[in-house]
Image: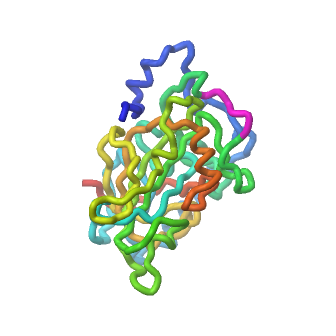
Amino acid sequence: MKKTFLTLATSALLVAPFAVNAHEHEGHGAEHQSVADSVIAEQRAALAKNTAGKGFGPQAPRDIDAVEGNNGRVFNVAPPSKEMNLCNIHFHRNAEHKAKDFSVYAGNGNGEGYESGYKYSGKLSRQELKPLKHEVCSKHHGHGALQAGDTIEVHYVYTTAQVKPGPGLSSCLSKDVINNPQLRVETQVYVLVNDQHALNFKDLTKVGKNKAGLYQAVGIPNNTGTPVQYEGSTTGPGYDEKGSPYQVTWSVRPHVAKVNIKTVGKWCEGNIFEENHGHGVRNLVKNPDLLSHIN
């Protein structure tokens, strides 16, 4: 596979007059008014109050460049993904996690997970940022609609349950057999570009089976850095003010890859996971009492 990972160093190789900061690109979300900082502060305070002393395990998402964490709840680390079944693939509009390569805060958003999160912090060419004539993945009342220059975080969810890949977290549970499987999320952040030579999202989300007969996402990039593994939870804006009770082992790749936005749009038009839009993001978890220590 050709090298597609993006770091600040490699992005500097772009021809300067034709390079634009990806986060300066004003697209479809520019007209939305963000809630005040006080709203996010109130949500963080509610999360702290609603979890204090109740035994919640470590939460997600987090800044993967920061290793600190005081949460002492212990659970077994999930097996490597090759020893588990892929059960779901979905993506969030803007990255839920934060790292050097995706560290530009998108803003507070609407207070419900949209227009918030983190964006690619490098540069893209004007051609890569050339707007499409229409938004893609926009079948959710406009929320999560995508344009060139946007950042997405893809979650490849794995389970120890004997299941087939399908829609939602329920596809990761084996009904009436096992409702508490171990879960792992292989995570990759992508920046969407208007470039037919960039990665094809169909390839990145291709499902196959390994020799052990386990479902796998066979197209996850292998050149975007060593994944940062930590103990956390499920994410999404529904947990901005309450703790997630699910235990999840996360593997988050630190570098970004470019993907052809048109192929993402095609995927949203039909896939086995019934995904057609970018999901909202949970506020970054900063409370050290809700974070595990990254070894």
Q: The magenta stretch spans which residues?
A: 129-134
Q: Position of residue 164 (x, y in %)?
A: 45, 69
**Horizontal relation, residue 275 to residue 155: left or right:** right
Does residue 205 show up? Answer: yes
Residue found at x 55% / y 46%: 94
Residue sitting nearer the eye, 224 or 114:
224
**Horizontal relation, residue 9 to residue 205: left or right:** left
Asked whether 95 falls inside the magenta stretch, the response is: no
**Horizontal relation, residue 143 to residue 21: left or right:** right
Q: Main secondary structure of the magenta part?
A: loop
Residue sitting nearer the eye, 134 or 187:
134
Residue sitting nearer the eye, 195 or 188:
195
Residue found at x 39% / y 24%: 10
Residue found at x 38% / y 43%: 221
Q: How many marks?
A: 0
Query: Is 137 placed above or below 80 here?
Result: above
Query: Is 155 placed above or below 65 here?
Result: below
Asked whether 132 falls inside the magenta stretch, the response is: yes
Q: Position of residue 271 (x, y in %)?
A: 57, 56
Residue found at x 50% / y 51%: 96
Q: Position of residue 48 (x, y in %)?
A: 49, 66
Residue sitting nearer the eye, 219 or 31:
219
